[in-house]
Each structure stands twice: as C-alpha cells, then as structure tokens.
Image (spheres, rainbow, N blue to C red):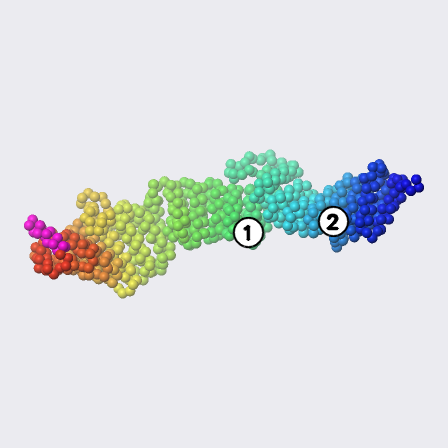
Amino acid sequence: MLNAKPKLEDNPRGALEQYITSLQSDSKVARKQALLKIKEDIFVNPDNVDCDLTVVFPHIYAYVLKSFSDASEACREVAASIISNFIDKLPLNDYYLTYILPVLVRRIGCPEIVEESEEMRLVLIQLVHEILVKYKGTHFLSSFINDFTNILTKTSADPFPKVKLEACECIILLAKVLQRDFHFQSESYVKPLLSNFSHQHFRVRVASIRAIGAIVIAGNVKCFELSITPMAEKLFDENTQVRLQVTLEVGNWMLCYRDRYSFWHRMIPLLLTSLSDVMADVRETATKLWTDIGLQYMEENEEDLKKKADFLKDVPTHYPDVKRPNLGCRTLVQSNIGKIVPAIGREMDGWQADTRLRVAQLLCWLILCAEEGATQHANTIVRTLHRGASDDDQRVVLEIKRASELFGYFIAPETWWPLLEADVDSWGALLVITNILKGSRKELITKKIMRELCKELVDPDRCRVRKPKYQRSLLQVTEALMDLCGEDCMPVAEELFIINFTVYAMPVDDQIQFMALSNLDKLRYIEKCGKTLTCLYSRHVRRVLADITSDAVTWSLLTPDRCLLECVLLHAGAAMGTQLHIIAPLLKECLATPEVDPEVKLKIFTALSTVLLQRQTNFSKSEPFKLECFLKIIVQEVILPNLVWSPGRTAEAIRTAAVACLCAALQDDPADHLGGDKGGDGDSGDTKVNLFPSKESLEPFLEELVPLLAGLLDDSSALTRQHALRAVCCLAALGARRGCFTAEILHKLYFVVLKRLDDSSDRVRSFAVQTLCALFGRRPRPYDAVVFGAHVDALYGAMLVHLDDADETFRKEMLDALLTLSDVDPRLLMKKVKANINLYRNKAAYEKLSSHLEVIIKSV
C-alpha cells in the first residue's frame, strides 16, 4: 500500500511526479513518452474522468508550457495538444490565459520566426483560434488584446499558407468579439494582410480580403484609407472567388460601415464595377447588394427623399432597355458622381487596357444611375468619352459607345453639343456623337442640333478627309441621324447627300464605299424620290458639281474635286444629263489645259468614254440643244486638241485616251459590233439617244477630224493606231447614215489605212482590213470606178499582195475582205488576179476569188 500511486485529484503532483521528472531527460523519446503519459492520465484515464482540472492545472502547466520550447517537434506537438485539452475542459477564467498566451506570443508572435516548424505554427495558431472561440462571449479577452495583436499580425504574414488562413479567421473573430478594444489596434493588422493580396493561392487572397473587410468595419478611418485602393485592384483578379469576395466586403461596408457617408465616392466605384463582371455570380451578387444599399439609403434619408418619392414617376417613356435602379441608388450616384468622374478621366489615360475597360464600364453605370443628375458634370464626362473613343482596345471603345448612348438618353442636346462642336475634326468625337444620337429623342435633335451638326460636317475640310476612321465615323454619324430623325431629316437632306456622296467618291476602302452607298440609299428612301439612286442624284448632284471650284492644274489623282467629278460621270446616270452645262466647262478645264496632270487626264478621259458609251442612260433626260452644245465642246475643245501629235510617252498615252473617247462618241449605237450597220437614227422613229442625229450635227467636225485621224494612223503607239482605225470605222458608218461620208473623205483615209496592212502589230493589221471593208462598204453611191480607178487599183493591188502573207489567219481575213469589196470594180479585180496568177503561192485563195468574180461579172 505504501507504493500505491496517489490519485490525481487528491495529489496531482504526486500522481504525475515521475512524468515530470522524465521531462528533464536528455532523451527526446523519454520526454515525449512523459508528455503522452501526462495527457493520458489527465484526459484519457477512466479513473480521472471526473477529476477537477482546476486543481491539476496549477501543478502541471509550467512543465507543459516549457515543453513548447522543446527541441523535439513531437514533444512540442504533444504539449500543445495537452494545453488544447485544458482550454477545452477548463472553465472560463483569464487565469489560465495569463500563462498560456505569453508562451504563444514567444513562439509565434515575435518579429523573428522562433517556431521553425510550419506544422507546429499551424497547431499553435489553431490553439489561439480555440481560445477565441471559447472566450468570445466573455470579457476576459480584453486584457490580452496586445498578445493577440502580436500573434495575429505575425502569423497573418506567415510563409505557410495554412497558417495565413487560420490567422485570417482569428482576426475576423477577434474583430467581432472585441470591437471596442480592436478599434485601437486595427491599423496594425492592415499591412500584413495587404501583403497577402498578391499571394499565389486564391484561398489566401480570399481569406485576407475577408479579414480586411472585418478590420475596416471594426477599425478606424485609417484602415479604410489603407485598404480601399488594394481592394479596388483585386477587382482585376483572375479568380472569380476573389472578385466575389471583394464585392461582398465592399457591399457590407456600404451597408454597415459607420463612416460610410464620408466615403460613398470611394466605395460606389468598386461595387458598380462588379456589376459589369464577366461572371454571372459576381454580377448577381453586386446587383442584389446595390439594390439593398439603395433601399437602406432611402430608409435612412426618408425625410430628405420624401418629396422625390411622392412625385416619383414610373420608368420614363424614353429610357434604355435596362432595369431602372431604385431612387436610393440614383440619389447616391447623383450626390457623388462629381467626385468619381474626374478619377475615371485620369484612369482613362492609363497604360493598362484592363483598367481602362473597367472604368469605361463604370462610367456606363454612373450615367445610368445619375440620369439627368450628370448634366452638371457633362463637360468632364464628354472629355472622358472622347478620350475613350480613340482607345486602341476595341473592348474599351465598345463600352464608350454604350456610355455615349446612355448619355444621349439623359442629357439634353443643348448641353452636349457645345462641348463636342469644336472637336468634330476628330473621329473620336464623331463616334461619341453617333452613339449619343442613338440614345437621343428625335424632337430634341431636329429643333436645332441637326442643322448645326450637318453644317459642320458638310464643310469640305471635314467631309473630304481621306482617313479610314474619320470616314467611317462620318458615315456612322449621318446614318444615326437618319435612323433617328427619319423624314424629319428633309431640311438637311442636301447636306447629308453631299457628306455621303463625297465619301462615296473618295473612299479609303471598299467597305467604306459600300457604307456610303447604303447611306445614300437610305436617304433616297427618306426623301421618297424614286426606286433608284438616279432620282436622288437628280435632286442634289448640281450642288456637288457647283462645289468643284479648285483649279484643275492643281489636281492629282487623290484631289477631292477630281474624285467627285469622276464619281458624277460614272454613277450619276440620267441625273448627269441634266447638268451638262456645268460638266462641260469642268471637262474643258481638266482635259484641254496642257498643264493638267497626265494621270488626271487619263482618268477623266476614261470616265468620259464610259459616259459616251452609256449615252442611252446618261443623256436620256438631256435637252437636245444642251446635248448638242455639250458635244460640240467635248469634241472640238476637249478631244480634238488632244489628238494633235506632240512628243513624249505621256502625250502618247493621252492621245490614246482621247482617240478611244472619240470612238465612244462616234459610235452611233454602242451596242453595235464594229462595222455593224445597226443603230437608231432619228428619222426612223427610234427614241434612242444619238449624239450626231443629223448631217448638220456631224459635218462641222469632219474637216478637222479627218486629217487628225489620218495622222493618228501613223502614230508610234500600236494602241493609238488600233483606236484610230476603230474611230475611222465608226466615222464611216456614222457618216454614211447621216449622208456626209464623201468620196473625198474616203480617199483621204483609205490610203493611210492601206499602210497599216504592213503594221508591226497583228491586231492593227486585222483592224486595218476591217477598216478598209468599212470605208469602201459605205462608199458614197454611185461610186464611179472609172473616175476613181487609180484609188481602186491601189486598193486591190495592196490587198492582193497580202493574200500571200505568212500569217494564215491574216490571209483568210484578206480573202474575206476581197470577196466583200469585189463589187467595187469586179472587172478590174479580175484583171489584176489573172495578170499575176502564176506568181502567187496561195493558189486556192486566188481560185476562190476568181470563181467569185466570174459569178459577179456574169450577173452584171
């Protein structure tokens, strides 16, 4: 009995003496075993289940707490477990904390890391958490606030993520249970937690944000000021949970923070930014919080908002297709927008695209909530919109478009137009105006702004700018104006036409030209002026031509006036035919002036050729007298001077263009094939347009025209010779129809054409054969072969020689031509064939020709 072990409750020291002694051993195994035995005896042994631990703790705590510094991690872990059991089972009394917390501070609350084991630091911070949980409803913790601060400010920045997480939970709990005392210590917690905002584990970031949220609620103003900017930065975090937590905390601040009325302008941007988050969860959470904040604000300011609430209208008739924020939300933004918008303007100049995107989205929500309340800040908002419209990131531009449209819904044109009027030279300003118009009310725009806007845009210095973004924006403005105002655009229809036609005439690319054409068609529909654009041109093209006032000598291919003239010639159709009295002087100035850029001349000549070929359309509404005067100017003062030979390749190219234009003019019916005998003449009742409807209209030109054509047949350019031969064919056909193709003209031309049978170009030779057929096929009747025998002899002689040409195709063409022209003087031709038949190699051709001639001679 003397050796019996004392009972723990009766003699704690005696019961645990041997284990306490073992704690002094040099063996870590012995020390661990001793700690385990102590734990077992106190908390596991059935004999000691009902033991009063308040009696045991004073005898054992010193040895166990000393083991917190044991060199063995296993011993430290068991010691922590013993203390954890004591905390759980001991009654509430700050006596125990007096001994436990200082030890914890030494282990994990010092500036330097004392407890090197991450796992042990986690165990110790969990021990702190247990203490906070157990004592949270008491007043015992107040006296230990410094100890908690030392521990938690250190562990919240611990390298081990799990320690950070546990420390954040402790901070949140401490902020709730010791609000009064925590207030004075709160600032110490902010910086360690903010250092976790960039941690790679999103759970650490989320926990730190939650802790910051709790600190701000319980802390002083400095905590808020230190935290708000880092919290805003976390709205750009790639993890959805992080952004969601920021939204929750900021929403909670706006609902519960004591000094929230002083910081609305700092918190509103964060919550409104979350309304545009890419994830639906964040957007929905932010929407609910924003609604609750607005309702709470209404309750808190019921007296001030009573009048507004009493006269509160339903959703206005002119309102965006979104849910309208409640009165509290609108009032909050209206009161603070002046402090927020300047900051947005500064951020819009930042270098980070994501930041610019978020502030652009924020601007949309501010305008939506502020409604007419944004009017007094319109200048700042417009500058921000203008800057954002020219952003390189299309996501930003898209949000600026939305913001501009919302701006148009709520801000009167008399407010925003003076702010943008001076900037219409900028495509960014035009983009803003375009989208403002989309949100504006028609009746407000048509009063005054429509006319002033079109007056600015129709200025040649603006609508003739050749820049892709500006042209596109210009077209978009006019399109938005027409979409908004519809038939009310009639007072500015001419200005709208000039703007769009100018871009159509000088587009940067095909897409812009198509946009301009689409706008012109929309204007045609608004003006109800027919089914085609020709009717629209008939109304307005005169103004376009009248505005072409620059000296043609100064023109280049890119000169706006040149582009406009060419566009009218190619696209105005019948509308051009009514403006010949304006077009003729322009063509004369451009094409008859030697100093004009040759490239310009070639372009205009090409366009003029197209006009003349499409005469049935272009001149269908022209008065005969005006058409005759126009043609006289074109032929005598434009085409003929350019047919005169002058040295140089440039002059050669212009001659080619001029003679091609002459071909187009001389073709009686452009649909006819070369040398054909079809075509309307005015005497047959045909209503087709004829440029030379009578002998009197054609004859005055022949005296000067025939020598020039004869000279062109010897031109150094094969293409010019080819076009000249075509022109001779057309002249012969037209002259024969009008009765002014004389033998004298025939004899002046055919001999020069004969020389072209030996031309170096096969195409010219082929055209020469066709031209001979056209000339003699339309010879004046009767044609005295005896009187003009020398000419006929020369013709047949030259042609017969080429029946032996080396080119088989040309031989066939020549045979067909001889068969065609054999009726001029068949006996003379037979005589020449018989005289030299033995000298020719192409026997078959001569035999065929002889047979054909015999038949003709017999029939005569």
Q: Which residue is mark 2?
A: 121
Q: Which residue is mark 1?
A: 353
The image quarter containing residue 804 is bottom left
Residue at 65% over, 43% down? 249
Q: Is residue 304 magenta?
A: no
Residue 68's disc is: none
Sequence-earlier tag: 1 or 2: 2
Looking at this view, is 220 or 126 the one in front? Answer: 126
Q: Residue furthest right?
A: 2
Q: Which structural element holds mark 2?
A: helix
Q: How many marks?
A: 2
Q: Amino acid at mark 1?
A: Ala
What segment is highlighted magenta in the picture? Answer: 844-860
Q: Amino acid at mark 2?
A: Arg
Residue at 34% over, 53% down? 565
For residue 619, side relative to residue 185 (left or right): left
